[in-house]
Amino acid sequence: MKKGKAKKLKSALREYIELFAETAILVLFINTFVAQASQVPTPSMEDTILVGDFMFINRFAYAKPVFPLEKTILPRRDIRKNDPVTFKFLPEGGKELVKRVIATEGDTVEAINKQVYVNDEPIPDAHKVHKDATIIPRDEASYGEFSVRDNFGPITVPPGRLFVMGDNRDISYDSRFWGCLPVSAVRGRPWMLFFSYRAEENVHLKQGLKDKLRRWTQYFPRARWGRIFYIVH
């Protein structure tokens, strides 16, 4: 090979490597700080978010701006009641969960026979669903941990904390059971679905090659096309 051609080949190879590295850094930056893609594995937020939904998570929604100009270019705001939020749940190895903010610091929360009250006022709960008509009484001796599912409190939310619950109230593992969420644990806000299919619960845990191939072949036959581009609220 002539010296000139070898030099050109080396130069082209270097360009490809640099392009790959730059693309990888950009994807990593977007995934970490802007919008992360995530699949929903459990039904705790039904019927707002379904098992098998693939969504983008807005990482900028509640982040504190580093520079003054950031606030103008990328609008952000404080977390409010009724906001869906994503957060790292340390008791389960840092798994990222989605729940809805029911109360913020200083609020008093209570539930009586499934109805949630904040500061003694019943909240509208437009997104909630109850798929189990049974009402569990506040009887820890008989029901253990589940005695707070339908009746709990009153609880006052401490400073720097949030009280969060899943929309699918009868199966959601949330602040009723493990307490108030630190605001610092919030990582973003569910934004938009980019794909959805009728998936099995916790299908992501099946990592064998056969399981993956079966899952890939189910994407389009089981697709919920009407949910694509759905904005989560």
Image (tube, rainbow, N blue to C red):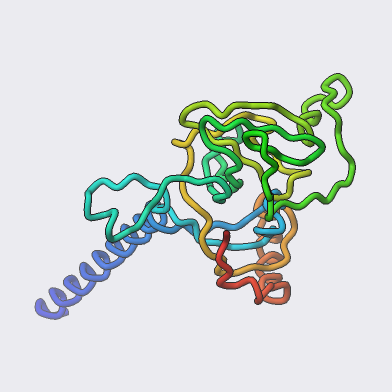
| Image quarter (top left, top right, bottom left or bottom right) of the N terminus | bottom left
> Left or right of 100: which side holds 18?
left
Can you give x and y, in whole percent of width and height, for residue 231 in the image? 55, 66
Q: Could you say which is closer to the camera, residue 192 or residue 19?
A: 192
Residue at the front extreme of this rendering: 121
Residue farthest toward the left in the current orientation of the protein: 4
Give the side of residue 106 with respect to residue 63, left or right.
Answer: right
Which residue is painted at 88% across and 46% down in the image?
133
Residue 6 rendering spot, x and y as whole percentages: 16, 75
Identity of the residue drawn at 41% across and 56% down: 31
Q: Residue at x 37, y 47 (%)?
A: 63
Which residue is depicted at the point 26% across and 46% down? 66
Q: Nearer the viewer, residue 95 or 179?
A: 179
Q: Quadrant of the C terminus?
A: bottom right
Q: In this view, does 2 lie above or below 227?
A: below
* Image label count: 0
Q: Is residue 144 left or right of residue 225?
A: right
Percent of width and height locating residue 162:
54, 36
Q: In this view, does 98 lie above or below 52?
A: above
The picture quadrant where one finds residue 228 is bottom right
Nearest the eye: 29 or 61: 61
Residue 194 coordinates in the image, percent (x, y): 55, 69
